[in-house]
Image (cartoon, rainbow, N blue to C red):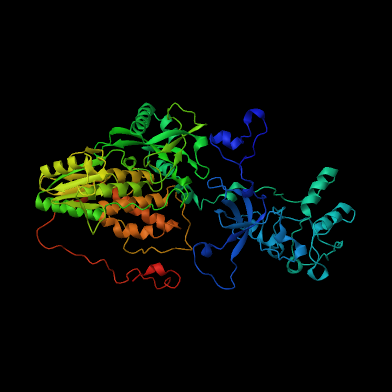
Amino acid sequence: MFNATPSLAKDKDGISPIELFAQTQVAARVKHSHTFGSPVYVLDAELQQGQRVGKWKERARIGIYLGASPRHSRKVALVLSLMTGHVSPQFHCVFDDMFETLRKSSGNPRPLCKWTEKTGFTDSDATNLDSAEIGPEFVRVSIRQLPAEMEIVHEEQGKGLLPVDPVDPVADNDADHYGQTQQQQQRQQRPADASTEERRETRQRHQSVRIIPQYIRASRSGRQPRPIEKLLMCVSWDVYDDNSNEELERLDHPISFAASSNPDILYLDDAMRAPDAAEFRKAMAQEIKSHTDNGHWQIVDKSSVPGMASILPAVWAFRRKRWIKTQEVYKWKARLNVHGGRQEHGVNYWETHAPAVGWSMIRLFLNLMILNRWVSRQVDFVLAFPQADIECDMYMEISAGGHLGASRRTKCLKLIKNLYGQKQAGCVWNQHMHDGLVARGFEQSEVDMCVYYRESVTLMMYTDDGIFMVPNQSDIDYCFNLLTTQFVHPITKVKHRAFKMTDEGDVSDYLGVEIQPLPNGTIKLSQPHLINQIIADLGFNERTGTKNTPASKSVKLNRDLHGAPFMEEWNYRSVIGKLNFLEKSTRCDLSYSVHQCAWFSAHPRQSHAIAVKRIVKCLILTRDKGVILNPQRHSFDCWVDADFVGNWDRVNADVDPSTAQS
């Protein structure tokens, strides 16, 4: 699968082609190389998930090794299932490179093989599945039609194997070569008046493994080979890739995953080909300058890196930032990230959880702001993650396009600050921010970890975006100045660095949500930009039909195991993720319908796709709608979230527990 063999040329210095192509050191690992087509035993899926299986149930299934996965680590193998014909990446495997488990001399049973039938390479009536086996010659031929002189003998007169030409001694040698001792069969003459029905009852078709060498030797000798409809010596790529793990593979690289659904989020190659590439180059230069001037890294020799430490790749991420109301680009952003996918747990990262304020809390304080006539101010932490120190010693490659005046081949970067892209970057920043706030007199809320109080001031934090809410502007000014200056604790004498923050003014655009004050004193929350993205993801336009409600009253979604498979071009999980964020922030009316569709994100069917389309067709009519916050000074209103098991399906309840939940 990969050409990882080191070159013997003097000018190559033992570098493999894959290293030249990737411009990085990728040493060949022979222990991860296995024989193509060899048997591989994959741990049972339930055991992989930590579940228990029956005492007599097999702990592993046998498959065929098709090489290393091109989208995962070299330890991940592509395995062809003998029963379904699907190919999937697997990690918990044991390889039989010498085919020892399939040797007849050891008394090993022949595994059942149905993949050729499932994938359409053979007919079910033309293949004896009980005698099918795998080995170095696991690709078989498909026998569709046989001539009259090759009729198979009656079951009671022989073994039912294809006859061998009596003047062809090579075929007998082939029989010995494949370990099959067969006696020469005589052609049987059938009576002329024998009915077709009788012949069908006495005929038994079997597949012969001697067809391949006989066909090749007959072609070389110039003789007319036995008629065979087609000889299959290769497997179509459609069998190798059934797209069953496409989303998990794309999630291994979150930057490329985001770039595929949002045209304003780009990878390095896309940004350099974009019409506004010059703006992105300026942003790259500014990013490098900011990190260098602030001492976020140090250039060191690769030879000085400890042997146990790995040098992580550098990844560029680009984004155009637009005003929500006008959709005008106001900023071109370039961010240099560490490739967190190459980190190892327990070696260079441990805890990764980083909390963020919930939208229910944000709406609560917006209502309190209306009732109490408070004022607000939005702040943004500039290069927030690098404001915290690195958790442990880490090293990163010098990025492409980053002009640091050092050779990428001999130099690397030792990280001093907490750079973006690390698995623990958000967690480290959150702890640094928490320590700085608590030292300055802020108190963390017991209800939400991202809400802090200091006297009459409330601060809500969503990663590096904050909102101050307070009765008067002077209190905000005092807290803002307190955070942007160095602070020394009066008791412990510990110094806390100043936070680098920018004042964004009154709250008007927070996390992609448009916050619009209305003339009557209420506040409207809407997300027309996100709704337009969802509509575009499904390929809808102005001619698409619309719906007045997001779900049908007469249709209840279930697993639909026997329904049509998902046939749409759009990404089901991506659309569901955007709909989830939409209903949590500004469209609570979509909660039930979106959650119903989200149940089946792992294995969506076409019926679930139709339900998602109906939700989006409803959004076409209501793209400018949202939540209007109009609190009153009476007690709160309560709606009970219960339907008295209204989704219970009497027919499918035994096999589908999701039809009803307590």
Q: Residue at x 67, y 50 (%)?
A: 35
Q: Image quadrant for the N terminus?
A: top right
Where does the image place residue 213, in percent across and percent down from the top left? 79, 50
Residue positioned most to the right: 167
Q: Taking 489 as reference, is 320 left or right?
A: right
**Is residue 193 depicted above or below 168 in this figure?**
below
Where does the image place residue 115, in percent across and percent down from the top left? 63, 57
**Is residue 337 depicted above or below 660 in this figure?**
above
Tell me, yes or no, if residue 168 can be seen here.
no
Tell me, yes or no, if residue 285 can be seen here.
yes
Q: Nearer the viewer, residue 238 or 24?
A: 24
Q: In the picture, residue 497 is in which quadrant?
A: top left
Q: Taking 117 as reference, is 305 left or right?
A: left
**Is residue 336 depicted above or below 173 in this figure?**
above
Q: Nearer the viewer, residue 203 or 219?
A: 219
Where does the image place residue 606, in percent across and percent down from the top left? 44, 56
Q: Nearer the viewer, residue 303 or 114?
A: 303
Q: Taking 189 as reference, is 319 left or right?
A: left
Where does the image place residue 519, in percent across and percent down from the top left? 11, 45
Q: Image quadrant for the C terminus?
A: bottom left
